Amino acid sequence: MTLPPRISHALADLRREQQEPVCAYLYDLPALRERVRDMRAALPANCELFYAAKANPEAAVLRTLAPLVDGFEAASGGELAWLRQHCPGHPLIFGGPGKLESELEAALAGDLDAFHVESLHELRRLAALARRTGQAIPLLLRLNLKLDEAPDSRLVMGGKPTPFGLDEEALDQALAVLREEPLLTLKGLHFHLLSHQLDVAAHLQLIRAYCRTFRRIAQDAQLPLTLLNVGGGMGIDYRDPHGAFDWPGFCDALHQLVAEEGMADVRLRFEIGRYIAAPCGYYAMEVLDIKRNHGEYFAIARGGTHHFRTPAAQGHDHPFVVVRGEQRAEIEEQTVTLVGQLCTPKDVLARRQPIPALAVGDLLVFTLAGAYAWNISHRDFLMHAPPRMVFLED
Ligand SMILES: Cc1ncc(COP(=O)(O)O)c(C=O)c1O
């Protein structure tokens, strides 16, 4: 694996400029732009691509994506306010469980494409809010489907007991509330059953099930539904960076699925996080120390899982590239465990990795670090300085 020239040059600049050892996140914004443009272009005409901001809400990332996506998904009042600040005028949806009353009110006070309703209680609270304010409230019901075959991945949010979405058994009650409340406007249904999906055929099967459920519910309840949000969840394979979800292959088959299921008149909305943002991010750590302990080599580098929790959170060895400095190699052709500066044995980014040559002062550059990385990390632990944040443009 090699680094793009833009990243290599930026790392060389950092080394030159900095007195202290390097510890930085680098974001390749032109690559992000190109990726999302290609993703959007491959989708059938009736599809929309929203970005799930929880994957990486950095303002520069959002601003890069804003002209290229159809809108953004917020999963908290904080994300919603942040999106309104940094992407004004772009369509926003507000989902997530356990919304506060103040968050519902703030969401309604500005432009909102739709609320994603997670429970009967939340629907009733929205009905009360609509009555109180006299404002119409656009919404989608999030359903936790029962499928013949439960979906399978490393992060499943539905198709089994979870806190997410309404049970189908609660649907009749939800529809009864909607019939009583003319200010609640049901635009469609929302499904997001899993993340880390690597299997295109399995995902198409899931989307087919969503389409059929959508049609059945619309028909049974005589509802003019026009919008089906099929969630996100396309996976990145951290163990094999070339094994990611095959988006072009998926989109090719999706054209056919839309035709077969008679869905061309329905808007299919994706709200994707990881698959859009992960490849644009790099986390670089300079090697501070190399030692042998109980027969194994460890490279201790500046930073750690308090900046980059992804490998610890997912339980994997994260892919990386070694950028050699000018120093003579201290070890050659050795197996090395890559760790950070925290005084916990859990601060491991990759275990027992074969490394051709390594010296103090070299850089370990972790790829696929643009999603669920810095923003999910326990950054205050041990009070180390934060990483430099570098947003690269052309
Ligand atoms: C409701 C919902 N939509 C979209 C996403 C984005 O998922 P991913 O980043 O896997 O695409 C998530 C992730 O948790 C989610 O919960």
Image: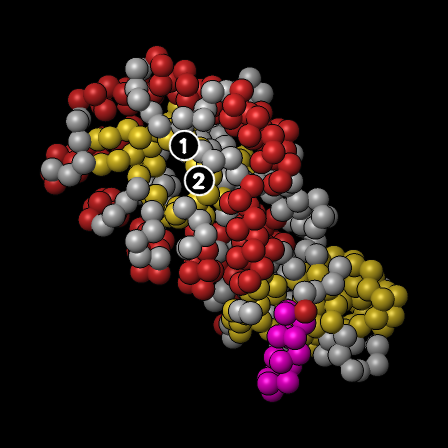
Label 2 C-beta lies within 8 Å of the nearest ligand 1 atom: no
* Residues shaded magenta: 6-21
Q: Is residue 24 above or below residue 106?
A: below
- Badge 1 element: strand
Label 1 CA crowd tier, 10 Å (few <14, some 14–19, many 20+) = some
Name the residue tied to disc 1.
267
Q: Look at 61% across and 41% down and name the residue there.
A: 247
Depth check: give the residue in front, 284 or 28. 28
Name the residue tied to disc 2.
48
Q: In what quadrant of the picture does the N terminus appear?
A: bottom right
- Badge 2 element: strand
Q: Quadrant of residue 304?
A: bottom right
In percent of width and height, residue 61 lies at 47, 60
Disc number for residue 203: none
Q: Look at 64% across and 69% down and name the residue there.
A: 7
Residue 369, can we see it? yes
In percent of width and height, residue 155 lies at 56, 39
Give the mark nearer the N terminus: 2 vs 1. 2
Depth check: give the residue in front, 77 or 306. 77
Q: Are marks 2 and 1 in contact (CB under 8 Å)?
A: yes
Depth check: give the residue in front, 68 or 277. 68
